[in-house]
Amino acid sequence: MGHIRIEGLSKSYINKRKVKRVISDPENQGDAVKVFENLNLEFEDGEMVCILGPSGCGKSTLLRIMAGFDKATSGKILIDDEEAVKTSPEHVFVFQQNGLLPWMTVWQNVELGLRHIEDEKEKTETIQEYIDMVELTNFEHHYPSQLSGGMQRRAELGRALAVNPDVLYMDEPFTGLDYLTHLKIREEVINMHSYIGKTMVMVTHFIDDALIMADRIIVMNDRPAKIIMERKLDFSRPRNIEKEPGLRDLRDEVFMMLGVSYVA
Ligand SMILES: Nc1ncnc2c1ncn2[C@@H]1O[C@H](COP(=O)(O)OP(=O)(O)O)[C@@H](O)[C@H]1O
Ligand SMILES: [Mg+2]
């Protein structure tokens, strides 16, 4: 299950050096940077949600808090009505750039998330299954540095899927890939989502990716970040933005919300 609810979530970072902090005075906590304030969000089980927003608005911070790697200043996150207080690998996996451990082979990286499987035969079969799924057969014993960018990303994807989490968070998963590899990996993520049906929350700055992939998009603005737009995308798949006037209009709208004109 992977139903997530975010209630009144706020996050501030305190830059300690500039302004003196007075512990007894809640208003004077040093030079605080409010990243976001009172965010309320809900993600349905199996939903694919893309979060868009300008750089620095707190998207990664939000994902890190949702995954339990960082603490909110206030508010809470509930996964299936239980407060998510610490990272649980069964629940959550964060897929991000350079997530592979460079000193481990593809096989060992995929194996990392499967330490709980005691039966060696089952473990070996599971690792192979996911390596095959992301088409890295015969590259099991290569190190990340021996793979192309696209292959590394596929290995990360295999690792994320092998863990079989209830919720998959993706932080800019296509950044740094060349155009064609980007499209291919995107297709793999879409297929994977329709196949395994897990809740996925993806942060991206690629508007087209969000429009092609998401069941729902969320647009945030700058500090302290708020949700300025939220839209369900009831378009059939596979989607083609150029051929779907509804998606083209929505793209214009999102560009406008982000303060840029699409037509230069
Ligand atoms: N560890 C940190 N300490 C202080 N400020 C931070 C820290 N991490 C992020 N920030 C600040 O919080 C804001 C949001 O950062 P981030 O979540 O990385 O944004 P995004 O992912 O949307 O680009 C930025 O202004 C950044 O400078
Ligand atoms: Mg980020």
Image (cartoon, grey):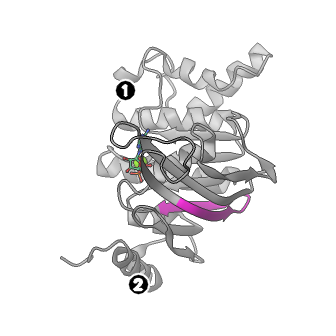
Magenta segment, which residues?
Answer: 37-51
Task: Decide: is 196 above or below 147.
Answer: below
The tag earlier along the polypeptide, 1 or 2, is 1
Task: Decide: is 163 above or below 262.
Answer: above
Q: Is residue 61 magenta?
A: no
What residue is rendered at 75% in x and 14% in y? 120
Majority secondary structure in the magenta region: strand
Residue 121 horizontal/vertical position (percent): 76, 16
* Residue 15 disc label: none
Q: Amino acid at mark 1?
A: Leu
Disc 1, SS: loop
**Observer-nearest of 260 and 243:** 260
Q: CA distance from mark 1 to mark 2?
A: 39 Å
The image quarter in which residue 142 lies:
top left
Q: Is residue 188 something one can see in this rendering?
A: no
* Residue labelled with disc 1: 147
The image quarter in which residue 158 lies:
top right
Q: Amino acid at mark 2?
A: Asp
- Callout 2: CB less than 8 Å from ligand 1: no
Residue 226 horizontal/vertical position (percent): 50, 67
**Observer-nearest of 44 and 56:** 56
**Observer-nearest of 53 and 115:** 53
Residue 49 horizontal/vertical position (percent): 58, 61
Question: How dense is the environment of label 1, judged by Cα within 10 Å: few (below 14), some, or many (20 and up)?
Answer: some
* Residue labelled with disc 2: 249
Disc 2, SS: helix
Q: Is residue 37 something one can see in this rendering?
A: yes
